[in-house]
Each structure stands twice: as structure tokens, then as C-alpha cells.
Image (cartoon, rainbow, N blue to C red):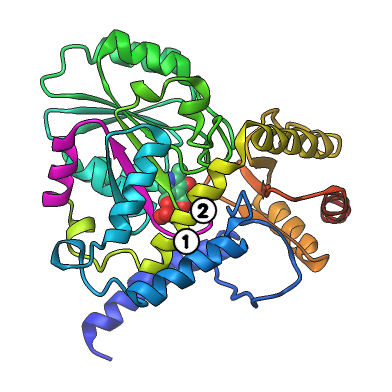
């Protein structure tokens, strides 16, 4: 071991010990393919990742295109299959231009890291995903965060930043990943009309679950046309992997293709993921308004059932139910006890959520029935004991 490596290990040791001692160390556990667990942890909201047609979409893509795209997009990795996926996503959410990415983290960090400049101001909800912050922080723009879903605060900031030299940006999600709640998108659209900002909307957790065709919450709220850049992921309700940005201005797409390092310098999304996603978009659309209404009913029913056992469970229809217990150790113990009963929910602790906000994150999936609800509630009661 040389001196540099010794110094590095010495430097890492303290912070990691602190994490372990405060019960906040993140550890990996590898799961078996068929572990019989009731999975209320993943984001496969429509259950498409194992849908035979989606799996066949991946297989067919591998047969036709091979197991890898084998290159970065500008050096041959961008195939007709990727272009077809882009077109399908544009048609779905009614945008003229789209770009597919290897994952949502790359899409968000590239978008906000590449397009805003040093004279710009980015107003971001306090709870936007880490990928948006990563981009915003390196963009050189001034980043101001407003209290979660507080559009009055946002309006005050918009007034304050009225004289900005560059561009004004607003970054929000439509369904927040750890809270499962949403801002008033109608009001955001109104604010955009009044203040002329560029609206970046991350629909990662709304795609498939919201909107008459499943295109997202902007579609459901009738404000799709007001969104300047819509970000969606392929690895959640679409049961595959990857992400997309949908854009109204072709110059934004050209700029990303030319300047976004995440796009340019990485082997492109594997054909299997693109093929699966293409099929998943068809399945998600086919669900229709009635299918979506059923999903929202499922969310209401599960929230009501959990709310009878734990205080503070918010109303809503999204697929994410936060069960905030507050204390980190209590969350860990509860989730472990539930796992012991074959039920897996997310145990989410700071810094992923604010201090004092440790929670179980229960994510729903199409097809969950009375039996699963019963199994979950039994495990939850045991966990809370
Ligand atoms: C709101 C939001 N945006 C973006 C991402 C990143 O997407 P991906 O998992 O495809 O990197 C996530 C979560 O993973 C998310 O919750």
C-alpha cells in the first residue's frame, strides 16, 4: 500500500464509521430471481417488466440488433430501433422532438448541466431528484430551491428574479419519488404564462400511471403544451431501462447531441432495453382511462388501509405511498420484520429524505389484489409492533 492509498483510506474511514454508527449506512443485498417476496419496493408500477410481450420485445431486439449497441450514439450506437422509440415517445406525449438516454440520471444531469448558463437562474423544488441537482450545480447558473410544492414561494421568487440577465428555469417533478405527491401543474402552467420561464418537468413516476393515454400527469392536467422539456424514464412503469427527454425546440436537441457528455461519451442504450420499452409504451397506452382509473382506485384503497394503522398517510392516487415513521432505527427494524414475513418495502433514510423523515416507501403495482393487501398489512402490523 502506498502513502496516497493509506491517506485515502484514513480519510474515508471516519465518515463511513459515522454513517454506520448512526444507522445510515447503505448496503447492498443481492436478490434471487424468484425469491417469492411480495415486492412493494420496485418501480415496476404497471408490472410490465415481466409482461410476455415486453420480454419478447427485448428478445426480438437482441435477435435483430445484438446484445449491445456496441458504440456511443454518434459513432454508430444510435440504431433505427432507438429512432423508432424516440418517435413513439414523441407521439405519445405529443412533442415534436425527443432524445433517448441511457438512464434518467444522465438525462436530468445532462439537461440541466448543459443548457442553462451562468447568467441563468434555476428555481427548483426542494425535493427534486439528485440528478437534477447534479446538473444544476455544475451548470454555472444560480440555483434557488423553493419549499416543496409551495407555488406561492415560487411565485415570489419569480417576481424577485424578474430582471434576470439570462434565462429563468423552473424544475419540478410531477410525482415526487419519495413522497408520491404532486404540485398543482395547472398553477405551474399559469405561472409559466405569467413569468415566461422554461419549465422542466420530470415525469419519472407519473409515466404510465397518469393521463388518459398514460403519457403522464401533464397530460392528465391538460398542460402538456406548456411543458418545455419533459423527462421520463423507461426503467419504472415501462419495465425496461433508460430515459427520454421530449422537447419543443429542435435546437435544444441538437445542442444536447453536440454538448451533453453523458450522451456523447457512453455506449448507447442496449437494443434489448429499447425493444422492451417500445413494446411497453404500446401496453401502457392500451391500458386506457378505465385501466388508469383502476390503478388510482388501488392507490386510494391501499392508502386508506395503511392510514388506519399509521397516522399521517397522505391522500392521493399515485403509486408511491410514504409511511413516515421519523426514526431511522424504527424504519430499519420495521422493514426488516416485514422482509422476515416475505414483504419488501423501501426503507428510506436521510440523506435521501430530510432528517426526521425516515419512512417506509410502499410502491404499488397493477394486479395487486386483496390477498397481497392482506399479506402486506399483516407484515406491517408485525413490523410496527
Ligand atoms: C424523479 C426521478 N428522476 C430521475 C430518476 C433517475 O432515473 P434512472 O433510474 O433511469 O436513472 C429517478 C430515479 O431513479 C427519479 O426518481
Residue found at the far bottom of this picture: 1
Q: Is mark 1 within 8 Å of ligand 1?
A: no
- Quadrant location of residue 48? bottom right
Residue at 46% x, 21% y is 185
Q: Is residue 371 above or below residue 71?
A: above
Q: Residues within 10 Å of mark 1 (few under 14, many from 20)?
A: many
Q: Which residues are magenta?
A: 238-259
Q: Quadrant of the N terminus?
A: bottom left
Element at label 2: helix
Element at label 1: helix
Residue in the foreground of this view, choosing between 331 and 345 = 345
Residue in the foreground of this view, choosing between 344 and 232 = 232
Q: Is residue 297 above or below residue 134?
A: above
According to the picture, the residue beneath numbered tag 1 turns out to be 276
Residue at 38% x, 18% y is 154
Give percent across and percent down for residue 91: 37, 38
In this picture, residue 189 sits left or right of residue 316 = left
Q: Is residue 10 above or below residue 246?
A: below
In this picture, residue 175 sits left or right of residue 8 = right
Contact between marks 1 and 2 (CB within 8 A): the answer is: yes
In this picture, residue 171 sits left or right of residue 296 = left
According to the picture, the residue beneath numbered tag 2 turns out to be 280
Inspect this view and state whether residue 11 appears.
yes
In this picture, residue 217 sits left or right of residue 87 = right
Give percent across and percent down for residue 124: 35, 30
The Cα atoms of the two marked residues, 1 and 2, are separated by 6 Å
Residue at 38% x, 11% y is 190
Give percent across and percent down for residue 349: 58, 51
Q: Residues within 10 Å of mark 2 (few under 14, many from 20)?
A: many
Residue in the foreground of this view, choosing between 348 and 1 = 348
Q: Is residue 197 magenta?
A: no
Give percent across and percent down for residue 164: 16, 18
Amino acid at each position: 500500500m502506498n502513502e496516497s492509498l493509506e491517506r485515502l483510506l484514513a480519510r474515508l474511514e471516519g465518515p463511513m464509521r459515522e454513517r454506520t454508527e448512526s444507522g445510515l449506512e447503505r448496503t447492498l443485498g443481492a436478490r434471487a430471481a424468484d425469491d417469492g417476496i411480495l415486492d412493494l419496493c420496485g418501480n415496476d408500477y404497471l408490472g410490465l417488466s415481466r409482461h410476455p410481450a415486453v420480454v419478447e420485445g427485448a428478445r426480438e431486439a437482441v435477435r435483430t440488433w445484438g446484445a449491445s449497441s456496441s458504440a456511443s450514439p454518434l459513432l454508430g450506437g444510435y440504431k433505427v430501433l432507438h429512432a423508432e422509440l424516440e418517435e413513439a415517445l414523441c407521439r405519445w406525449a405529443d412533442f415534436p422532438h425527443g432524445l433517448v438516454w441511457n438512464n434518467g440520471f444522465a438525462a436530468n444531469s445532462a439537461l440541466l448541466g448543459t443548457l442553462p448558463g451562468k447568467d441563468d437562474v434555476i428555481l427548483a423544488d426542494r425535493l427534486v431528484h439528485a440528478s437534477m441537482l447534479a446538473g444544476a450545480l455544475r451548470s454555472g447558473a444560480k440555483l434557488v430551491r423553493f419549499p416543496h410544492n409551495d407555488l406561492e414561494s415560487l411565485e415570489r421568487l419569480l417576481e424577485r428574479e424578474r430582471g434576470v440577465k439570462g434565462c429563468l428555469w423552473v424544475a419540478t417533478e410531477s410525482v415526487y419519488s419519495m413522497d408520491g405527491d404532486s404540485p398543482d401543474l395547472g398553477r405551474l402552467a399559469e405561472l409559466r404564462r405569467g413569468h415566461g420561464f422554461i419549465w422542466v418537468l420530470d415525469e419519472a413516476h407519473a409515466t404510465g400511471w397518469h393521463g388518459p393515454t398514460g403519457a403522464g400527469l401533464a397530460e392528465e392536467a391538460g398542460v402538456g403544451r406548456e411543458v418545455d422539456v419533459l423527462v421520463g424514464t423507461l426503467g419504472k412503469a415501462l419495465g425496461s431501462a433508460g430515459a427520454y427527454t421530449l422537447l419543443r425546440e429542435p435546437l435544444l436537441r441538437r445542442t444536447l447531441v453536440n454538448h451533453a457528455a453523458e450522451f456523447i461519451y457512453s455506449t448507447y442504450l442496449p437494443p434489448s432495453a429499447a425493444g422492451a420499452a417500445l413494446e411497453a409504451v404500446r401496453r401502457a397506452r392500451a391500458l386506457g382511462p378505465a385501466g388508469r382509473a383502476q390503478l388510482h382506485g388501488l392507490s386510494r384503497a391501499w392508502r386508506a388501509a395503511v392510514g388506519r394503522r399509521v397516522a399521517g398517510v397522505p391522500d392521493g392516487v399515485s403509486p408511491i405511498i410514504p409511511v413516515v415513521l421519523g426514526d431511522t432505527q424504527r424504519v430499519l427494524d420495521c422493514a426488516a420484520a416485514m422482509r422476515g414475513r416475505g414483504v419488501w418495502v423501501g426503507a428510506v433514510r436521510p440523506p435521501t429524505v430530510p432528517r426526521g423523515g425516515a419512512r417506509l416507501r410502499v410502491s404499488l403495482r397493477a394486479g395487486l389484489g386483496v390477498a397481497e393487501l392482506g399479506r402486506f398489512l399483516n407484515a406491517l402490523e408485525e413490523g410496527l409492533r
